[in-house]
Amino acid sequence: MGQFPCPANGEVTTRYTFPWGCDKVKKVKFFLAIIGIVSFLGIIIVLILTMREKNPPPPPVPENPQGADVVIDNFNYTSTNEQGVVEWQLKADKASYFQDKKMVSFKGVHATFYSKEGRTFTIQGDTGILNTEAKDFELSGNVTGTSSDGYKFRTELLKYIAEKNQARTDEKVFLESPQFQLEGTGMILDVKEQKLFLVKNVKAKAKK
C-alpha cells in the first residue's frame, strides 16, 4: 500500500484514509493525536502487540443486583497513578458493589480521562463493569465520547485496560471533527501516547 509524506507536519498516512490530500490532514491534540491509520502493516503490528496478552474479562454482572454488598446512587470512583495524579474518573447514576468478585456494575456511566497537558476526554454509556483490582472497565450501549478539543465518536462497546492505558473496541466506530468524518470497524485509543488507530473498513469524508 502506497504512502506519502505530508509536508505540513512530516507525518505519513495511507492514501485511502485521506483521499482529499495532505493539506487537509489535521493533527488532533488529544482524542486523535495522529489522524487515521499510519499504514496497513503498522496496524497489524499494533494489533499483535496489544492483543497478544489478553486480560481476562471481568466477571459477568449478576442477574440479581440485590445480592450486592453495597448499592450506591451517584457513584464516583477516581483512579490515580503512583504519584497520586488523577488519570481518570468514573461516575454513574447507580453502582452495585460485589466485594468477593472485586467488581462494580453500574448504570448511566460517565468516565473522564485526564492527560498530563490538562486535556480531557469524556465517554459515557448505558451500562458498565469496573474491575476494582485491575482498574479495568467496560462500557456498553450507546457509547459516546467527546474530547476537550471538540472531537466526537460513538460505538456500542468500549473496553479500557488500565495496565496498558488503552481503550479499544471491535465494534463499528464513527468519528467526527469540524473538518472530517471517519468510520471503521475496530478501534484502539492509546491514552498515554495520545494516538488512535482504526483497524479495518476505514472510510473518510471531508466536510465542505
Image (tube, grey):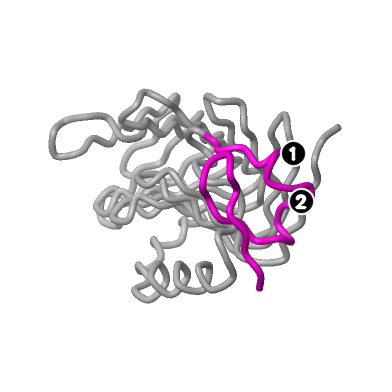
Which segment did they paint magenta? 1-28
Q: Where residue 137 appears, x then y in whole percent? A: 41, 49
Mark 1 is surrounded, within 10 Å at the Cα level, by few (under 14), some (14 to 19) or many (20 or more) other residues, namely some
On screen, 63 above or below 76? below
Percent x, y of residue 91? 44, 30
Q: Element under label 1?
A: strand
Quarter of the image containing the C terminus? top right
15 drawn magenta: yes
Instruction: Say which residue appears at 74% left-offset and 48% top-offset.
Output: 21
Q: Which image quarter: residue 124?
A: top right
The quadrant where residue 144 appears: top right
Classify mark 2: helix, strand or loop.
strand
* Main secondary structure type of the part rendered in magenta: loop
Q: Are marks 2 and 1 in contact (CB under 8 Å)?
A: yes
Residue 191: horizontal and vertical position, in percent? Answer: 40, 44
Is 62 positioned to the left or the right of 153 in the image?
left
Q: Quadrant of the N terminus?
A: bottom right
| Residue at screen point 70% across, 58% down | 184
Residue 64 appears anywhere in the view: no
The residue identified by callout 2 is 204
Of marks 2 and 1, which one's residue comes earlier in the chain? 1
